[in-house]
Amino acid sequence: MGTRCIHGGDTVDAATGAVMPPVVTSTTFRQPAFGEPGPYVYSRASNPTRDALERCVADLEGGARALAFASGMAATATVLELLDAGSHVIAPADMYGGTLRLFSQVRTRTSGLQFSFVDFTDLAEVERAIQPNTKLLWAETPTNPLLQILDLAGTVRLARECGALVAVDNTFATPCVQRPLEFGCDIVMHSTTKYLGGHSDVLGGLNVVADAELGKEMVSMRSAVGGVAGPFDAYLTLRGVKTLALRMERHLSNTAAIARWLDEHPKVVQTHFPGLESHPQHELAKRQMDGFGAVVSFVLSGSVDGVGRFMNSLEVFTLAESLGGVESLAGHPATMSHSNVAPERREELGIVDNLIRLSPGIEDVDDLLADLDKALAAV
Ligand SMILES: Cc1ncc(COP(=O)(O)O)c(C=O)c1O
């Protein structure tokens, strides 16, 4: 994987030999003769810098084709464009709040899609939700913010029976840890804003498609709707991907050490991390993933005031939205990523007000543990 991050998709510029592809800002391309366009016509359809990023990530995920978007949400929205009005989608109740908002508040109203949100860790519940018009099973694993692990092979079996597509938000895992297409899934979606970009300096999204025909359909939908990644963003993201495997090694080891430490801490009521033997899907995670991902969430004991004291005492971790950058971030799902989910619904799902989500970066783990120790002492 380390080699493929650097050489995957052969991103050396064929025209000049530049080892990093040039940032091609031109929006349009000269046509050699009337009726005979060259390989590039107009940048909304395709662009050489964006193509290089797409070839590299298609290689990492083992897909026929990848498509880069302006954000993770633009990538997700374009998956929905493959569906006709009246189609039914099954998705996990626990998933990124922005995806939940797009599905339940936007596309239900504007595209006539129907959604069922289920406990996706229970495949019997997913099966019970299948309807004659079910066209897509949308999975996110590990889930945001509770780090549940969903069974990809089992989901594919159900989808094959009802003729639906399976799309997986693989943002939390990255292709270094989990490659859903190997389990028969049809589409992998990434917010490249997170680990793939890796430096908290570029927003982006990607869909990788297993089948070339489906890839063509998605290219056509992306051109129609227009949420493409710009060339500078594509360049920065590709630059990030080059070090993905190296960064993930450190993210994974730091997070595993922090999760074990938190799990033992007297001020922590519950630790959500699939690498812990106590995690309900630990065995599944071992089968499905190479490592356990690099996000950990935990419930702080005591009143909700303690969350503020914890956050305000952190010095190495930064209180901020997002995850997956080289710097460690601490987030509060109830007021950040899941603030658009109704409080009663959050409580039902386990996204309690005392839940804190950490995205350990690649700093020295001893400094991260000392920072958490000091902040927990202040609670
Ligand atoms: C799991 C997951 N999917 C999708 C998104 C949306 O990505 P973006 O912010 O790049 O639009 C996020 C953002 O936090 C996320 O955490």
Image: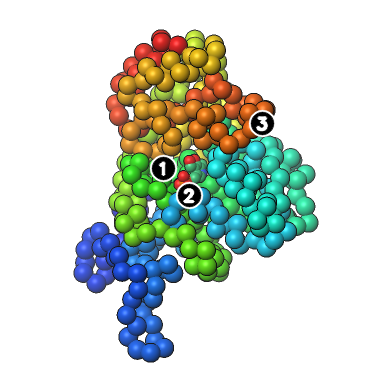
Q: x and y percent of residue 262 in the render? A: 46, 18
Identify which amino acid the numbered label 2 is placed on. Answer: Gly
Q: Residue at x 40, y 42 (%)?
A: 195
Q: Can you identify the residue that label 3 sits on?
A: 345
Q: x and y percent of residue 298 in the render? A: 51, 22
Question: Are the two marked residues, 2 and 1, in contact with CB atoms closer than 8 angstroms?
Answer: yes
**Which of the marked residues, 2 or 3, is nearer the chain's N terminus?**
2
**Which of the marked residues, 2 or 1, is nearer the chain's N terminus?**
2
Q: Is residue 275 left or right of residue 185?
A: left
Residue 72 numbered tag: 2
- On whether ligand 1 comes within 8 Å of the CB at mark 3, the answer is no
- On whether ligand 1 comes within 8 Å of the CB at mark 2, the answer is yes
- On whether ligand 1 comes within 8 Å of the CB at mark 1, the answer is yes
Badge 3 density bin: few <14, some 14–19, many ≥20, Cα 10 Å: few
Residue 326 drawn above or below residue 115? above
Q: Toward which corner of the image does residue 58 lie, by quadrant?
A: bottom left
Q: Residue at x 46, y 36 (%)?
A: 293
Q: Residue at x 50, y 54 (%)?
A: 74
Q: Can you identify the residue that label 1 sits on?
A: 194
Residue 292 drawn above or below residue 161? above
